[in-house]
Image (cartoon, grey):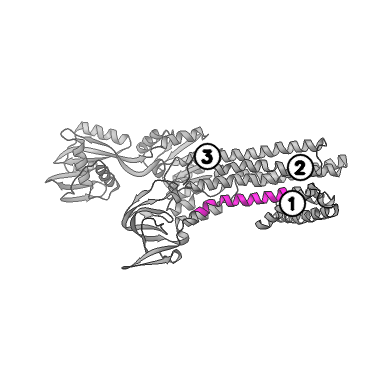
Amino acid sequence: MRKLDKYLLAALFVALALHYSGVLIASFDGGLMAALSIVATAPVILSALRSLQRRKISVDLLASIALVASLLTQQWASAVFINLMLTSARLFGYYTENKARGAIKSLLKLRPEKARIKRGAEIIQIPIDKIAVGDLLVVESGDRIAVDGVIEEGEASIDQSSLTGESVPVARSRGDEVYSSTLSVAGSIVVKAVRVGKDTTLEKIIGLIESSQNEKAGIRTTADKFSSWYIALTLIGAVAVYLAFRDLNLLLSLLLVVCADDIAVAVPMAFLAAIGFAARRGVIIKGSAYLEGLSKAKIFILDKTGTITSGKLAVVGVTAMPGFTEEKIRVLAGAAESVSAHPVAKAIVRYAKEKGISFKEPEKFQETPGKGLAAEYGGRALIAGNANYLAEKKIAMPPAAEALIRQAEESGYTATLIGYDGKLAGFVSTADEVRPRARSVVKKLRELGVSKIVMLTGDNERVAKRVADEVGVTEYHAALLPADKLAYLKRDISSSGKLVMVGDGVNDAAALALADVGIAMGAIGSDAAIEAADIALMRDDLEEIPKTMELGLYTRRVAKQDFWIWGVTNACGILLVAFGVIHPEGAAAFNFITDFFPLMNSLRLFNLHRKLNVKTA
């Protein structure tokens, strides 16, 4: 069909050129124009009939009426002109579809065809569709990973830009997850396949982008509604004009001027271009309805853990008691927690190593879940845990120390007390780390018109207040269960303005599905996030939310400009017809020329990286 339209477009151009050059004899010229008009009109009428079968009035119905009227009155040039416009619009639609599918094509190019599999001592090469879950893939420098999996051996720098949009490679070693289509830029690893074929992250993203092209945004639905009432009013107006003036040429001129196929192409073109641009940045939007919904958002509900915070504990302070130094506390805390798998212990050990602190593992240790750990270190008793545990171990708590610990806990921190040789040596304060630019993101959302920002968390009141104050959120609700979060959303979902829920896509899957627009943070590798969210951010970058909102606002602005351009040019055309300046042939030519104005306006969306100053992978 696309190839036929290309040939048809060329034939219509040639026919018009020959017609206006006068090189053909009148009878042959008329026959050629008539034949091409009939052939080109057939697909337009078929499209209109298919729409009517679906109980939908399309702009092709109006175009069909104008074309049939042109053929009946033997206005061949008018029919050729209007078919030239309609064929051009169809080709523009194909162009738009191909451009929007650019993100898919670029991802498909990244999919390797073969992979090296380790079978015992032997390494064999097989097609990727033969890889099974549990297979061990050997990935050398320069190889693309063919599956989602876990590193079993080695370490490497992995370029994840194909999925996340981030340009800086990330270090990955034994136990870390890696994803399909990502590139090993340095190092050699052995990867155990966890998800293969259609279950990989790459294939899920491709599927989402493909399905998003069939979705309709509200403004596109508005365009469809516009087509319905616009065509009805146009037909009523045409009948009224004919009854008033009994002038068939005047009626035909008006019908030829007001055909609106350009809007039917220009508005979808704008949204599909924006979705393709976002995909190249690692932001997967399931449909243009969600892009438009985000741009209209007035209420944002932010989950704390994994959204405003990183979801990982970090040391925020070290307090030493008299007779001890902060460095000594780091050594003692690191040694005590080095034998524990508790999240707080891991955070303390990581912090000590980052500070360059060296320590030995304790000689003997015993961990009591929910309380702490007792060990022997340097021949002396070493205790790490909460206040009750230290009291059980007969570690005295000076009043000044109690005040400092209480102050840290009231600020929303978790205090891990360190006792050494029967004395309180000090304590380490830990907290869920707030994302570095969370405050600026909250500020930017308000600048973009969001009137209400709420933080929800299952943490206690003290922790919630600390995080809310740190990022500038004035309303928050603490100690919530998943069901409580859903209940809160149900109360606000009926409020004026679109409601956006931002979460990590796993614990918040139900809430993401309930919101007008659900955004999942760091969705790479998470099936729950990709399935539940309307917009999936492949990496943990909170700044992508206001950037995507700006993208939606800009796209809506372009779409509205398309309507204004169309309205102004149509008004000018109607005036030219009313004052007798143009007649059917001129009206068709005017329509053909001006229909490209909104299309060219929407084409600006294909250069978004320049307009929004945002880099793509």
The residue that label 1 is drawn on is 14
Q: Which mark is residue 610?
A: 3
Is 444 left, or right, of 234 in this rendering?
left
Check disc 1 and report its element: helix, strand or loop: helix
Q: Which mark is residue 346?
A: none
Q: CA distance from mark 2 to mark 1?
A: 23 Å
Residue type of the residue flagged with mark 3: Arg
The residue that label 2 is drawn on is 257
Is 542 left, or right, of 64 in this rendering?
left
Residue type of the residue flagged with mark 2: Val
Q: Counting other residues with Cα less than 10 Å from the Cα at mark 2, is it few (<14), some (14-19), or many (20 or more)?
A: many
Which numbered mark, 3 or 2, is in the foreground of this view?
Answer: 3
Q: Earlier in the sequence, mark 3 or mark 2?
A: 2
Place of residue 519 in the rendered image (x, y in percent of width and height, measured from the top left): 48, 45
Q: Is residue 206 above or below residue 296?
A: below
Q: Earlier in the sequence, mark 2 or mark 1?
A: 1
Residue type of the residue flagged with mark 1: Val
Q: Which residues are magenta?
A: 83-106
Kindly indicate whether the residue at mark 1 contacts the one at mark 3 (C-beta within 8 angstroms). no
Which numbered mark, 2 or 1, is in the foreground of this view?
Answer: 1
